[in-house]
Image (spheres, rainbow, N blue to C red):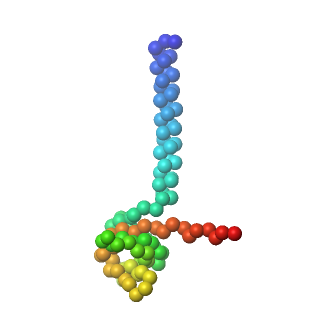
């Protein structure tokens, strides 16, 4: 085999591996979208009324956000607890409920 043939063979292998790497990276990106993650409230907010896990200080609890005015909202929790918008730093989507058995 000549040096040119070896180089061509290696170039083909590199192109094949690069295509496979791009496919794997695309698959990983799609999977990452399915995994709940902590979202900073500075990045975006959850839909109003949608239950989410919130983090404020060293505490985490299930809550939902409700509008009071366009520029002000409150995080409502189970029971008579509400948390002002400035205290919550992150939120995370809840996983789907378990499927009923049998």
Q: Residue furthest top?
A: 2
Left or right of residue 24, residue 82 in this image = left
Q: State the residue lying farthest toward the right.
A: 102
- Residue 72 image offset from top left, x and y in percent: 34, 80
Looking at the image, residue 14 sits to the left or right of residue 98; the answer is left
x 52%, y 48%: residue: 27
| Residue beneath the point at 47% across and 54% down | 32
Question: x%, y% of residue 25?
Answer: 47, 45
- On the question of residue 84 being in view, the answer is yes
**Would you say residue 67 is visible in this rendering?**
no
- Which residue is the extreme one toward the front? 102
The front one of 54 and 42 is 54
Q: At which x and y percent is residue 66?
A: 42, 80
> Within the image, what quadrant is residue 70 found in?
bottom left
Location of the C terminus by quadrant is bottom right
Q: Nearer the viewer, residue 1 or 70?
A: 1
Which residue is depicted at the point 48% across and 41% down? 22
């Amino acid at each position: 085999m000549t040096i040119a043939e070896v180089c061509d063979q290696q170039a083909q292998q590199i192109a094949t591996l690069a295509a496979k790497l791009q496919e794997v990276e695309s698959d990983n990106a799609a999977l990452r979208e399915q995994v709940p993650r902590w979202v900073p409230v500075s990045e975006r907010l959850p839909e109003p009324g949608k239950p989410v896990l919130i983090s404020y200080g060293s505490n985490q609890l299930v809550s939902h956000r409700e509008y009071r005015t366009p520029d002000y909202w409150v995080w409502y929790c189970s029971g008579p607890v509400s948390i002002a918008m400035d205290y919550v730093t992150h939120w995370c989507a809840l996983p789907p409920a378990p499927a009923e058995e049998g």
